[in-house]
């Protein structure tokens, strides 16, 4: 699976990139139909708690793209929440077939 990471108005640390790739690979192992994951990270203003936003968009052939948008205290937590939501969406998509 191809993972593209875009950070809006900041630079992504290598540690965060590794974390995202590891989590995305786990999702790809469970659901082989996923071809691309677009991850957008941004800091929501104002600078308070719960201001890290992760938007993850998965490309699944012959289906609409699946999207999860989560906000949390850290980017890692937001990525976890978004990928868990996408895992549930992919499971429902499989059950429909």
Image (cartoon, helix red, strand yellow):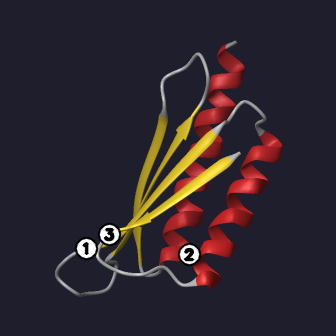
Figure quadrant of the N terminus: top right
**Disc 2: which residue:** 76
Q: Relative to residue 58, is residue 8 drawn left or right?
A: left
**Disc 3: which residue:** 8
Residues at marks 2 and 1 touching, judged by CB atoms closer than 8 Å: no
Measured as percent of width and height from the top left, residue 61 is found at: 61, 22
SS assignment at label 3: loop
Residue at 68% across / 56% down in the picture?
24
Figure quadrant of the C terminus: top right
Which of the two discs, 1 and 3, sits closer to the camera?
Answer: 3
SS assignment at label 2: helix
Q: Relative to residue 51, is residue 72 drawn left or right?
A: right
Query: Label 1: how many residues lie within 10 Å, few (<14), some (14-19) or many (20+)?
Result: few
Residue at 54% across / 73% down in the picture?
77
Residue at 35% across / 80% down in the picture?
10
SS assignment at label 1: loop
Residues at marks 3 and 2 touching, judged by CB atoms closer than 8 Å: no
> Spatial distance from mark 1 to mark 3, Cα to Cα?
10 Å
**Which mark identifies residue 96?**
none
> Spatial distance from mark 3 to mark 2, Cα to Cα?
16 Å
> Spatial distance from mark 2 to mark 1, Cα to Cα?
15 Å
Mark 3 or mark 2: which comes first in sequence? 3
Q: How many marks?
A: 3
Q: Relative to residue 65, is residue 27 drawn left or right?
A: right
**Disc 1: which residue:** 44
Tell me if residue 14 comes above or below residue 17 in the rendering: below
Measured as percent of width and height from the top left, residue 37 is found at: 57, 47
Query: Label 2: how many residues lie within 10 Å, few (<14), some (14-19) or many (20+)?
Result: some
Mark 1 or mark 3: which comes first in sequence? 3
């Amino acid at each position: 699976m191809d993972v593209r990471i875009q950070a809006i108005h900041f630079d992504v640390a290598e540690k965060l990139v590794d974390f995202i790739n590891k989590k995305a690979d786990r999702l790809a192992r469970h659901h082989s139909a996923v071809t691309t994951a677009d991850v957008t990270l941004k800091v929501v203003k104002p600078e308070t708690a719960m201001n890290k936003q992760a938007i993850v968009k998965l490309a699944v052939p012959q289906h609409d793209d699946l999207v999860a948008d989560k906000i949390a205290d850290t980017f890692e937590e937001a990525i976890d929440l978004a990928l868990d939501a996408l895992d549930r969406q992919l499971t429902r998509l499989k059950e429909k077939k």
